[in-house]
Image (cartoon, coloured by chain):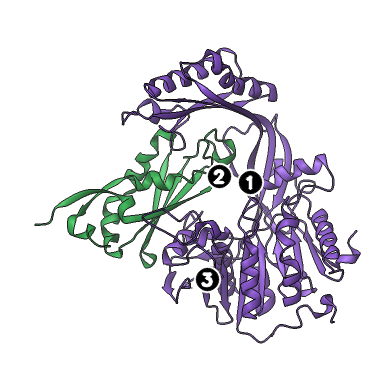
Chain colours: A purple, B green
Amino acid sequence: MIPLGLKMLKGVPSVSDLFLVGNGAGFSGDRIDAPIPVVRSLVKRGLPAAMFFECLGERTVALAQLERRRDPEAGYEPMLERLLEPILVDCARAGIPILGNFGAANPAAAARAIARLAKKLGLPELRIGLVTGDDVSDRVNLDKLAVHEADAGLDMSSWKLVSANAYIGAAPLAEALAAGAQIVVAGRTSDPALAIAPLMHYFGWAEDDWQALAVGAAAGHLLECGSQVTGGVFWDPGFKDIPDPANIGFPIAEVGRDLSLLITKPEGTGGIVDQRTVKEQLLYELHDPSTYITPDVILDITGAHLTPSGQDRVAVHGLQGRQRPDLLKVTACYEGSWLGEGEISVAGPNALARARATADVLLQRVKQRGLARRARADLIGVASVHDSDDGALWRGYAGPEPQDIRIRLAVEATTRDDADQASREALAMLCCGTAGTSGARWRVTPRILTRSFLVPRDMVPTETRVLPAREWN
Amino acid sequence: MTQNIETPLHRIAHSRAGDKGNRVNLSLMPYDPALYPLLAEQVTEEKVLALFRHRGATACKRYDLPLLNAFNFVIDEVLEGGVNGSLNLDGHGKSHSFRLLAMTIEVPSEKLNRP
């Protein structure tokens, strides 16, 4: 038997003009069995390929950093082992490298966890690459930088910095692949970089080949949210139906040496890839379509168009790239206030009047006890997610009488205790509330607020280290 | 004679919302490309901004992408503090695509009969 560690990356054809990129997760919390059919499909097709996992939302690093403070070996993607265990051997055997920002706030601990998993699975030679440098909390003096974007109400004087991470680009990830990494662990990266890196490595794209990088960025952008390009957050029963929504296939991009790009999904899975799903995802979180900024390239989709290319296959044309920005985005996360939430239900005759009165009383209680900096009430079943903090929609509601309403109180409080006391006002309505009030739930959550800055690239040096699993301790 | 019918966008178009900071973007794509000019005429920046005024939205910019048969609306200051600062259950504002799709427009009746 050939030792797996040596066979890797050698058994695949290096002359293919097509490279496949599969996605196994679109956020921390995604379906953990999703990567399995993607890897099965990549293995079956036998073309050079890579898998990537995008696991970091804006706040995820900060929440992970809080975990790390509690336990120095924590702070990486909590589902890491569960995501990787079913696919690691198959990927290693087929020479399919895996990339992920699943290192979150502790990429080195994630590398060690992967090493333990690899050894357990009989892959002691698996080459694990670690990319660090995104964490700039000790290196960059944020006070001196201009604020790029900020959450409202961020009072810097009293709020404690939890994390500050730069969105790093594809180059250090590609460097790890060049050093033979079969799995690359990073913390904060730009989402598209995870897809650009294996393409850059395989096709030998230069760091200033804007046209090629634009295609890579578009592939990454379309895939980075997993099922969102294959039917997730798309299906709308009776209007946009998809097959088997319980088993949506996660996406695969086919990228050509000629810079062709096609989006598809594994056969035998649910979901759908058509022009509608690709358009929705292409425009997702996009502002000016001529200027989608990534650390590697500025993507312009104003000339983009799509053509169907068989079942669940859509080709993307007309992408343009421009020179990458000089500055990198750093997102800083702060703690310091608390979210208190309490909910209670009413149903049946006169539910709307009882719900409105309940909401008003909850707001009055919180106010007279001085528990909240801000408070809001929702009438779930009348108006909530579309409503404003002052309840303009539920107060002005004049539609048919709803039969079942959940009243939600939400407060921003200075202390954990204030948030807890406020949320318990919903509980107190079990006895003090309107007739037929029931079903109280209450909870308190620490709030993480973010602020982003732009920093020169040379303030964010990265480091790439590649070692076999047996050497990670 | 052509008769206009007031129709929710949901019947003729689809949309997805995305967020960045305290901004939301809403894509809008008619199922039938022939309806693109009609949407361009009726789904204006002003009308879309009006849907979100109650939340304090301050500006709306529409980008037209005719090659994709799509529009992209970018709405500022609509998330009441952004995903992290908001007290809303939907801090991301991802449900807002369906507020847009509830908007009604006037569609000639013969254009509604298409599948």
Q: What numbered label is drawn on residue B114?
A: none
Mark 1: give few (<14), some (14-19) or many (20+) Cα within 10 Å: many
Disc 1 to disc 2, C-alpha distance: 9 Å
Q: Chain of mark 3?
A: A
Q: Position of residue B79 (x, y in %)?
A: 50, 39
Amino acid type, label 3:
Thr
**Which residue is denoted by mark 1 in the rendering?**
A452
Mark 2: give few (<14), some (14-19) or many (20+) Cα within 10 Å: many
**Which residue is denoted by mark 3 in the rendering?**
A264
| In this rendering, the label closer to the viewer, 2 or 3 | 3
Q: Which residue is pictured at 69% across the width and 38% down the height?
A: A334
Residues at marks 3 and 1, common chain? yes
Residue A346 in sight from this viewpoint: yes
| In this rendering, the label closer to the viewer, 1 or 2 | 2
Amino acid type, label 2:
Gly
**Which residue is denoted by mark 2 in the rendering?**
B21
The answer to whether the residues at label 1 and label 2 have Cβ atoms under 8 Å apart is yes
Mark 3: give few (<14), some (14-19) or many (20+) Cα within 10 Å: many
Q: Chain of mark 2?
A: B
Q: Position of residue A396 (x, y in %)?
A: 35, 27
Secondary structure of residue under mark 2: loop
Q: Position of residue A166 (x, y in %)?
A: 69, 53
From this view, report whether residue B44 is shown above or below residue A417. Answer: below
Secondary structure of residue under mark 1: strand
Disc 2 to disc 3, C-alpha distance: 30 Å
